[in-house]
Amino acid sequence: MVIASETMELVEDDEMFSEDSEDENSELSDNALQEAFAKGLLKPGMNLMVEKSKRFVNNVQGMKQSLSDLRKDLPWVERLDLTNPPVEDVLAKIGGNMQSGSNGDVNADDDFQREMFFYRQAQATVLEALPLLSKHGIATKRPDDYFAEMAKSDQHMQKIRKMLISKQAIMERSEKAKKLREQRKFGKKVQVEVIQKRQKEKKAMMSAVKNYQRGMTDKLDFLEGDQKAPGKDASRSSKKASLNKKGPNAKRKYKDQKFGFGGKKSGKKWNTKESHNDVSSFRAKVANAKGAKGKKKDKGRKQNKRPGKSVRRKMKARS
C-alpha cells in the first residue's frame, strides 16, 4: 500500500511538471514571437495558410442501405406517391417544334421551358391519380351540400363578441367622463371670470367712493349701479336698443342716403363742368318766383295787402 501511494504521488508530480513546462514553453514561444515582431524579423510570406482539399465521399452502398431502411411496405392509398414522366407537348408538336423535354433534356436556364415541364408533369400525375383514387373509393369532388366547418366554434365567437361589446362600452364611458371633465373645467372658467368681473366692479366703485370723499368729483352715479330708476335716460336707451335691433326706419335711411353720416362728404355735391353746363332741369317759372307763375303771386299779394294804419282808422271812424 505504501509503494502504491508513492507511485501515485510520483505520477501526479510528473503530470503537474509536464503541464507547467507546456505553459512555460507556450509563454516563451509567445514572448519570442513578440520580440521578433518588434525587431522586424517577421516578414510577410513566412507564414502561409494552407487549405486542405475537401474530400467528397460518395458512399453509394450506404445510401442504398439507408433508402432501403426508409422504405415501408405500405399500400398506395397510404403513400399516394406517383413517379411519371410529363405528358406530350401537344402545342410544340402541332407547331413542328419537337422539344426533347419529355426525355428529360430541359434547359434549366430557360424559365419558360422549365415551368412548362413542371406543368406537364403535374398534368400527367393528375391523369394517372384520378383513376386510382376512384378505384380505391376516394372522393375527388366536393358534394353540392358541403359546408366548411368553422375554425372557431360558436361559443368562442360569442365570447369574442361579448368582449368587444364590453370594450366598446368602456370606451364610451371614458369618452363621457372626458366630456364631463371638460364641461366642469369650462364651468369653473366661467365662474372665475364672473368673480373677477365682480371684483373689478367692486374695486372701481371703491375708488369712485374715495374720489368723492376727497372732493375730486361731485357725481354720485356710482351709487345707482343696476338699481337705476327707469326714467327718461332709461327709456331713451331702451328705444335706441330697440332701434339698433330692428334697424333704422325709412326716414332715417333717406336722410342717411341724402346727407351721409357726418364728416367730410369727399366732394359728392361739388359742381363739375358737366353739371354746370347742364341746364336741362332749369324751369324759369319756378326759379326765384319769376315768370308767369311769379306774376300771379305778386298780383295776389297786392290784392290781399293789408291797408295802412290811417286807412284803417278812417274805416273804423266811418263805421
Image (tube, rainbow, N blue to C red):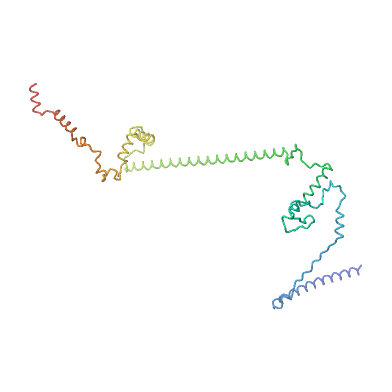
Whole-percent x, y for residue 271 in the image: 26, 44
Whole-percent x, y for residue 55 in the image: 81, 66
Residue closest to the eye, 193 or 136: 136
**Does residue 37 sit above or below 235 in this rendering?**
below
The part of the image, by quadrant, that contains residue 13 is bottom right
Whole-percent x, y for residue 115 in the image: 73, 53
Residue closest to the eye, 57 or 35: 57
Please indicate whether residue 135 sits to the left or right of residue 45 in the image: right
**Does residue 92 sit above or below 244 in this rendering?**
below
Image quarter hosting the N terminus: bottom right
The part of the image, by quadrant, that contains residue 39 is bottom right
Residue closest to the eye, 248 or 218: 248
The part of the image, by quadrant, that contains residue 59 is bottom right
Whole-percent x, y for residue 153 in the image: 73, 39
Image quarter hosting the C terminus: top left
Please indicate whether residue 167 sits to the left or right of residue 153 in the image: left
In the displayed orientation, state which residue is furthest to the top. Answer: 319
Q: How many marks?
A: 0
Please indicate whether residue 141 sits to the left or right of residue 253 in the image: right
